[in-house]
């Protein structure tokens, strides 16, 4: 098989032709209608962008290039990256070539460490990581080629160069952030020939005599690698990249989105909640105690981290895969046991609470099931990575695979600058008023219609 770059070079003309064909034959067909509720409600369910790396089916979860995530969980993370980009799993030769690329690009410039060291010591790990990526922007091949008048057809190639460099360096920077932030010693270096997961585990510097942490890290990186195009980090990265900002700008922006508690930070919030729960009851609580604690959280206006999802309506298969790992490797671990018991209790609590909300005139909770963040933290906690404000960094090392793949493919098919239309509250009131007025006598209706047409001309 060809290398990643050769394979993309072969495939991209077909991607472009297909995009053109679809636009020519179906360009005027309707994908989605947008209600007022959706416009105010985070555009939930609005189909308004293209992403070929993966899809998330509400009843099945993550599917990467046609492969349900649990069927490809044992690939190496770089194989998943190859798959995201090309739709194919690499053969031995292509995998070796990719490994050489990472080995070659993994050296982190000294000024990155100087910058991270210069930050106040209580800087959150996610800020350190995003800063580390952003400060390397001066290395961008895309930026350098663009300044020299790069042709549009070559955008993807320059983006791929930046993508490989970021992906090779991010485990080194992320592990370095852990060691600097938590006084574990100097950053460690990449080992040539080791895969991304094992390398990352190794550079954290935690004891891993049986290689279980490395195994977990491979699984972790695969499960978090991508979640179609609309999640906050991917969508942010996509939007920034659409302005032809390079991958360093776009990825660091995406990471800042991942750092929110409703998105990637939920893995930290979740372990914090579990530890508080255990502290309150002096160990793994009973189901009744758990229900009491859960209701307390909800009634104080907070969310139960790790539960619910904007798209999924079933147990997240990523949760299932990580939970199986926990059952196999740490069934006696009290934190894991607590997570396991929470899984039995919280969906019922959320269901009951949702009814209370509806009775009080609020929105129902759409999904009572756990997402990936409900379990991921408990597994790394078992292996001694107990500094949970770091956990979103683990998610980040993985999610850059999806963000970067999407950036390369978007430049390949020539995606234009993102610019949805917003409307004002005044526009909503006027336009929705127009609809009501349609039932009124003819004279009033025409005057309202006229004002609505005028508003449309003004573009509001
Ligand atoms: N605990 C309490 N309330 C919840 C929960 C939850 N776990 N999930 C949803 N709700 C509330 C939600 O806050 C919203 O309330 P309001 O109308 O007052 O704003 C209402 O239920 C309806 O929300 P949904 O339509 O069910 O969910 P939405 O698509 O708006 O949000 C999440 C999705 C993931 C943001 C939401 O389920 C949540 O906040 N979950 C907890 C945080 C979490 O686990 N995030 C990680 C997501 C996965 N990731 O890795 O990024
Ligand atoms: C993700 O992995 O990005 C999360 O599950 C959030 C999402 O898909 O909206």
Image (spheres, rainbow, N blue to C red):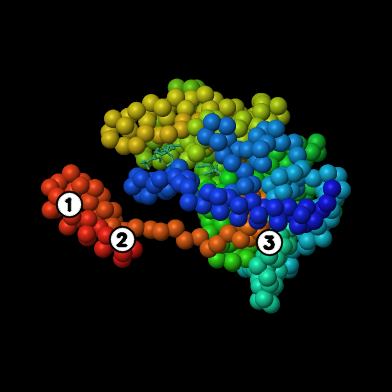
Q: Check the image and name the residue furthest to the front.
A: 25
Tag 2 and tag 1, C-beta contact below 8 Å: no
Q: Which residue is mark 3?
A: 156
Q: Residue at x 60, y 52 (%)?
A: 21
Q: Residue at x 48, y 51 (%)?
A: 28
Q: Quadrant of residue 192?
A: bottom right
Ligand 1 falls in quadrant: top left
**Some atom of ligand 1 lies within 8 Å of the CB belonging to the residue at label 1:** no
Left or right of 365 on screen, residue 160: right
Examine the rendering and report whether any part of residue 236 can be seen: yes
> What percent of the width, then of the height, locates residue 10?
76, 54
> What percent of the width, then of the height, locates residue 146?
66, 73
| Structural distance between the alpha carbons of marks 1 and 3 | 52 Å
Q: Which residue is mark 2?
A: 456
Count all numbered tags in the image, as a single digit: 3
Dot 3 lies on which element?
A: helix
**Mark 3 or 2, which is nearer the eye?**
2
Q: Between residues 236 and 153, which one lies in front from this camera angle? A: 153
Give the number of the disc on residue 379.
none
**Some atom of ligand 2 lies within 8 Å of the CB belonging to the residue at label 3:** no
Q: Which mark is first along the chain, 3 or 1?
A: 3
Give the number of the disc on residue 445.
1
Is residue 114 depicted above or below 432 in this figure? below
Q: Quadrant of the C terminus?
A: bottom left
Q: Residues within 10 Å of mark 3 (few under 14, many from 20)?
A: many
Dot 1 lies on which element?
A: helix
> What percent of the width, then of the height, locates residue 297?
41, 36
């Amino acid at each position: 098989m060809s290398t990643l770059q050769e394979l993309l070079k072969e495939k991209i003309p077909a991607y472009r032709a297909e995009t053109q064909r679809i636009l020519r034959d179906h360009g005027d067909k309707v994908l989605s209608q947008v209600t007022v509720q959706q416009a105010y409600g985070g555009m939930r369910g609005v189909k308004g962008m293209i992403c070929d790396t993966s899809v998330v089916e509400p009843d099945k979860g993550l599917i990467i290039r046609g492969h349900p995530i649990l069927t490809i969980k044992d690939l190496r993370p770089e194989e998943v990256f190859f798959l995201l980009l090309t739709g194919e799993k690499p053969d031995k030769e292509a995998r070796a070539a990719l490994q050489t690329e990472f080995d070659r690009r993994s050296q982190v410039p000294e000024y990155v460490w100087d910058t991270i060291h210069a930050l106040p010591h209580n800087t959150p790990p996610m800020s350190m990581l995003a800063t580390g990526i952003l400060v390397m922007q001066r290395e961008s091949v895309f930026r350098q080629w663009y300044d020299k008048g790069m042709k549009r057809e070559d955008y993807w190639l320059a983006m791929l160069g930046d993508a490989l460099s970021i992906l090779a360096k991010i485990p080194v920077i992320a592990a370095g952030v852990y060691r600097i932030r938590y006084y574990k010693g100097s950053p460690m270096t990449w080992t040539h020939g080791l895969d991304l997961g094992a390398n990352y585990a190794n550079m954290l510097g935690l004891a891993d005599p049986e290689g279980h942490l490395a195994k977990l890290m491979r699984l972790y990186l695969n499960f978090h690698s991508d979640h179609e195009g609309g999640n906050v980090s991917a969508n942010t990265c996509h939007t920034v990249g659409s302005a032809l900002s390079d991958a360093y700008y776009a990825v660091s922006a995406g990471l800042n989105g991942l750092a929110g508690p409703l998105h990637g930070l939920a893995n930290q919030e979740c372990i914090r909640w579990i530890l508080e729960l255990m502290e309150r009851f002096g160990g793994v609580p009973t189901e009744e105690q758990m229900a009491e604690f859960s209701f307390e959280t909800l009634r104080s206006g907070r969310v139960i981290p790790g539960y619910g999802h904007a798209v999924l309506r079933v147990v997240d298969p990523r949760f299932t895969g990580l939970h199986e790992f926990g059952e196999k490797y740490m069934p006696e671990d009290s934190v894991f046991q607590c997570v396991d018991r929470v899984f039995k209790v919280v969906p019922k609590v959320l269901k009951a609470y949702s009814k209370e909300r509806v009775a009080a005139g609020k929105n129902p909770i759409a999904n009572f099931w756990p997402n990936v963040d409900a379990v991921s933290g408990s597994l790394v906690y078992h292996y001694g990575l107990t500094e949970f404000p770091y956990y979103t960094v683990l998610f980040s090392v993985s999610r850059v695979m999806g963000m970067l793949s999407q950036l390369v493919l978007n430049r390949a098919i020539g995606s234009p600058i993102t610019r949805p239309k917003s409307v004002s509250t005044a526009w909503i009131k006027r336009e929705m008023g127009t609809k009501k007025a349609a039932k009124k006598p003819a004279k009033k209706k025409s005057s309202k219609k006229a004002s609505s047409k005028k508003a449309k001309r003004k573009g509001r």
